[in-house]
Amino acid sequence: MEENKNNERIRAYLLSKNLPIDLLVEVQDHFLSQIDELQKGNMSFEEAFKKVKNSWFNELRFSKYKIQFDLNDRTYFEKKIKEELRIGILKKSFTVTLMLAIFVIISAQILSTNYFRYLFLNVIILVIATPLFQYFKNNKLFKLAKNYDNYKLTLSQDATTISLITLGGTSSFLYNIFIHTNDIYETIKYWQLDFGLIVLILIFFLIMVNAYCFFAQRDYLEQMNKVQPYLKYLKPS
């Protein structure tokens, strides 16, 4: 009984820090482990809890000055971990984009215009469809975030719907890609600096955005494995 009450106090303290739940679960494990270690030295829970809070003070404090476009107060710890996550996802997205760019360049060198056109369009459609398919396949898990919109369930939650948000503009963009496939083909095959190059840059930007969305979704789904058991402690919106 006493242990449950102590766990509730730790949980309430960490919830007051507005941490995403996946990050909160990890921090809570650290708190419990450190408090338990201190209590083995005959320290009371109150003393141990206070000491652990003090040791985490710099990490779990909020920015001194609020930035107007930052709608939620975020601790320094969250900002640091989120930046590391963002950089990791960006690296994966860039790697995928680079590999597809190399594949497209090689294809343009060895294929005729017609074959290249269909191959290129299929690559673009696959890139766009993959995060959309993943979203609808795991729709229940992604919608779960809406049931708890007074919390942030995972660090990557905000980027999981990028492909849905950009879907309308993407569909019209596909039509333009089809029209300008010959320009793109000649730009790649003959290394021309013309209109086709601008279209090509926009296409690879589109690929990177969708790749970023896909990897953000993957992270969200992985983190939800440890978030779901914690939902019983949260109040649905």
Image (cartoon, grey):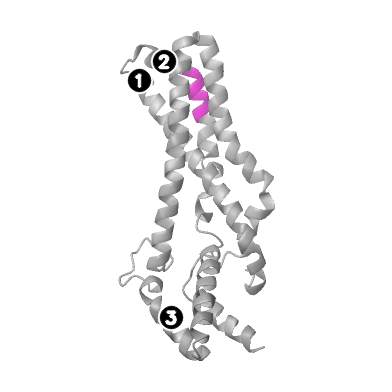
The answer to whether the residue labelled 1 contacts the one labelled 2, judged by CB atoms less than 8 Å apart, is yes
- Residue 190: name its quadrant: top left
Quadrant containing the C terminus in the rendered view: bottom right
Q: Distance between the residues labelled 3 and 1?
A: 58 Å
Residue 224, given in percent of the width and then of the height, sits at: 61, 58
Magenta span: predominant SS is helix
Residue 114, given in percent of the width and then of the height, sits at: 53, 10
The residue under label 3 is 53
How many C-alpha atoms fall within 10 Å of the one at disc 1: few (<14), some, or many (≥20)? Answer: few
The answer to whether the residue labelled 3 contacts the one labelled 1, judged by CB atoms less than 8 Å apart, is no
Residue 63, given in percent of the width and then of the height, sits at: 34, 70
The residue under label 1 is 195
| Extreme residue in the front direction | 41
213 over 53 or under it: above or below: above
Q: Which residue is drawn at 43% across and 44% down?
A: 90
Residue 178, magenta (yes or no) = yes
Q: Residue at x 41, y 15 (%)?
A: 183
The residue under label 2 is 183
* Image position of 75 (left or right of 173): left
Disc 2 marks a residue whose amino acid type is: Asp
Pick whichever, 173 or 58, lies toward us: 58
Disc 3 marks a residue whose amino acid type is: Lys
1 or 2: tag closer to the N-terminus: 2
Pick whichever, 95 or 69, lies toward us: 95
Disc 1 marks a residue whose amino acid type is: Phe
Pick whichever, 178 or 83, lies toward us: 83
Q: Give the range drawn in magenta.
A: 173-180
**Where residue 27 is drawn, which disc sits there?**
none
Q: How far apart are marks 1 and 2 (CA)?
A: 7 Å
3 or 1: tag closer to the N-terminus: 3
